[in-house]
Image: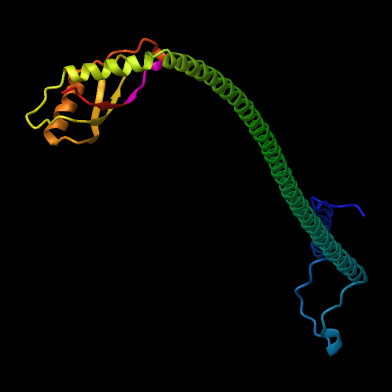
Amino acid sequence: MIRDERNVIPVLLAALVHLAIFGSMAIAIDFSRDRPPTPLAIQAKLVSEEALAPPGPTPEEIRQRELEAERQRQLEAEQTRIRAEQQAEQQRLAQEAAERKRREEAERERQRIAAEEQRKREAAEREEQRRREEAEKERQRQEAEKRRQEEIERQRRENERKRAEAEAAQREQMLQQQLAQESERMAAIESGAMDRYRFAITRKIEQNWVAPASARPGLECVINVRQVPGGEVISASIESCNGDAAVQRSIEAAVFKASPLPEPEDPSLFERDLRITFKPEQ
């Protein structure tokens, strides 16, 4: 079927109908002009009622009217058909537009869902990658911490071993020194150097003692003396004494006055803490 988008056919049919109408009117006017004039003389004639009735249409007029009516019906039918086709075309276009819109909306929804699923997958992959990276970092950290602890433990054991060896060597050296000093000391003692050392200390204390009036013959006191290398006295106290308090104070004062005390002939005989028996000659 040929589409008439500009309505050319209805316009042509309408123009033909109007031309036919104008042509019929012109023919009727011409027929009336050709009739001869009627004489003015009045003649009476008896006619019947049927003769007085207006004359009916001629066969040609009937045929023209029927043609006109047929053309009008065809025109109306064509217009109706055209309107129906237009409505059908409009409905089809509307349906196509609706279907196209539905498909576009469905495609957009599909794309949105696909994009959302892709975003979720990418987010899940990123999260999984992050967890794997964190797990790997934690594993590396634990391994590094384990190696560090093992190194610390190894170093501690090595230091402990070295310290034990150093302490053992130091103890051995000190023991050797003590043995040597003890041997020297014993040799010095056996030679009488210790007796001479103690006698010299006692003698210097007696020389610095100022006997109080309460001192009696037979005085005997034990004095605890602490000195530092060089003989400087840092403390003196009476352990036991048969003299009174004044005598004891005088003896302690004599010890401090005797500082520095004499040094031994052999340095191995030096004693930081001395226990001296003070028995002055009367």
Q: Which residues are magenta?
A: 269-274
- Image location of residue 249, percent across then percent down: 15, 31
Q: Residue at x 74, y 52 (%)?
A: 113
Looking at the rendered structure, the number of numbered marks drawn on it comes to 0
Residue 207 percent coordinates (x, y): 17, 17
Q: Residue furthest left?
A: 213
Q: Residue at x 80, y 57 (%)?
A: 99
Apparent side of residue 260 relative to residue 138 in the rendered image (left or right): left
Residue at screen point 79% across, 50% down: 6
Q: Position of residue 109 (x, y in %)?
A: 74, 53
Q: Please tell me whether residue 90 is drawn above or below residue 125 in the rendered image.
A: below
Towards the viewer: 273 or 192: 192
Residue 260's image quarter?
top left
Q: Quadrant of the N terminus?
A: bottom right
Taking the image as drawn, is residue 281 in sight? yes
Side of 279 where 104 appears, left or right: right
> Which quadrant does the C terminus fall into?
top left
- 209 falls in the magenta region: no
Q: Is residue 271 magenta?
A: yes
Q: State the image coordinates of residue 148 (x, y, percent, origin top left).
A: 64, 31
Q: Is residue 23 visible?
A: no
Vertically, is 24 above or below 8?
below
Closer-to-camera residue (193/259): 193
Does 50 appear above or below 241? below
The residue nearer to you, when weighing 210 against 14, is: 210
